[in-house]
Amino acid sequence: MPIRLLSCLLIFAAIPSGQKSASPGIQSEGSDPAALIRRASANEVAALRSPEHFRYREMLQWKWGTETRDVMETPQGRADRIVQFNHEPLSPDQALKQQRRLQKLLRDNDAVRHEIEDQNVEVKRRISMMQAFPLAFVFTPEGKEDGLLKFSFHPNGSFSPKDRQTQVYRGMQGTVWVEPNQKRLVRIDGTLTKNVSFGWGIFGKLYKGGTYRIEQTQVESGQWRITTLDLDLKIRVLFNTSRLLRNEHNTGFHPTPPGTTYQDAVKILLGSPARPDR
């Protein structure tokens, strides 16, 4: 199963444009958990569809090691460069490979198009997942924790998945925390409590017991970004069964300078392969 499919199953970042959110100050939000989740999700989709762009450090821990990337976002898309492996500077061969990859993006329009198309497809997947999120679960208030509203959730028996992606909701339950003033989804902890099959079980399966954790942080006034994503999933793709471990931490967010294009970002990354952590 492609990594991007798994990430879209677990990252909640958007809400359907056709679904109306509650108006500010509506009193029913306080007594209707689903209304509050819809409102918070509406704020997430607004940010996703009109994002602010940042440069930051992304650390990805896989079973085979840890990659640290210098990431720069632009209106056209995201550019990145691996700058460390297992917390050490790249070897000369590894650094050369990164340099050649970025240089190709400067001269090969097809490579850029494919890169950005993949990013756009991922955003659409996230939107599709969040379109179903408020409908797929029953939310129960669990009080406050560190100033956040806490809700447990479990599958809504009347929810009917419309596509392969949203079938995963049939096996999920967990907890979601909401920032009450700005109404943003701050954290989601979830567990797969039963096996979930894709393509009648032929294409693949996610096995019960898998866990995920997503945290979002306000990196600037009114600007929230995912800073932690932890996955521990046992999956089967066709006839191959494996365990997916992914630990992602994003730090050091700074706004991308206005007017920076994708090509500008690639050039900047080429000129600063060892940008320090901040």
Image (tube, rainbow, N blue to C red):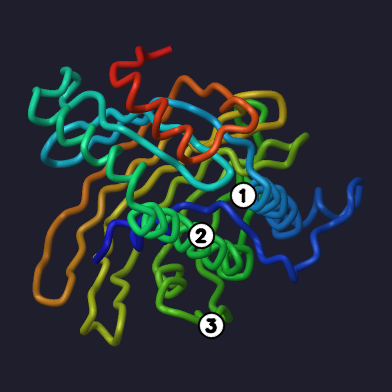
Whether tag 2 and tag 1 are in contact, CB under 8 A, the answer is: yes
Viewer-closest of 126 and 136: 126
Residue sitting at the far front:
107
Q: Callout 1: helix, strand or loop?
A: helix
Q: Callout 2: helix, strand or loop?
A: helix
Viewer-closest of 149 and 64: 64
* Position of 4 relative to 93 (above/below): below
Direction from residue 175 to residue 37 in the image, left or right: right
Q: Nearer the viewer, mark 1 or mark 3?
A: 1
What residue lies at 40% left-to-right and 34% top-to-bottom?
A: 266
Residue sitting at the far bottom:
200
What residue lies at 61% left-to-right and 43% top-to-bottom?
A: 185
Viewer-closest of 165 and 175: 165
Direction from residue 12 to residue 87 in the image, left or right: left
Q: Which residue is mark 1?
A: 48
Q: Of callouts 1 and 3, which one flags the residue occurring earlier in the amino acid sequence?
A: 1
Instruction: Confirm whether residue 94 shows in the render.
Output: yes
Give the alpha-carbon distance from disc 3 to disc 2, as whole Å. 18 Å
Q: Find residue 206 and report its horizontal and vertical position in percent.
A: 27, 67
Dot 3 crowding, Cα within 10 Å, few <14, some 14–19, many 20+: some
What residue lies at 40% left-to-right and 78% top-to-bottom?
A: 164
Q: Of callouts 2 and 1, which one flags the residue occurring earlier in the amino acid sequence?
A: 1
Q: Of callouts 3 and 2, which one flags the residue occurring earlier in the amino acid sequence?
A: 2
Whether tag 1 and tag 3 are in contact, CB under 8 A, the answer is: no
Q: Which residue is mark 3?
A: 160
Q: Which residue is mark 2?
A: 126
Give the alpha-carbon distance from disc 1 to disc 3, as whole Å. 25 Å
Dot 1 crowding, Cα within 10 Å, few <14, some 14–19, many 20+: some
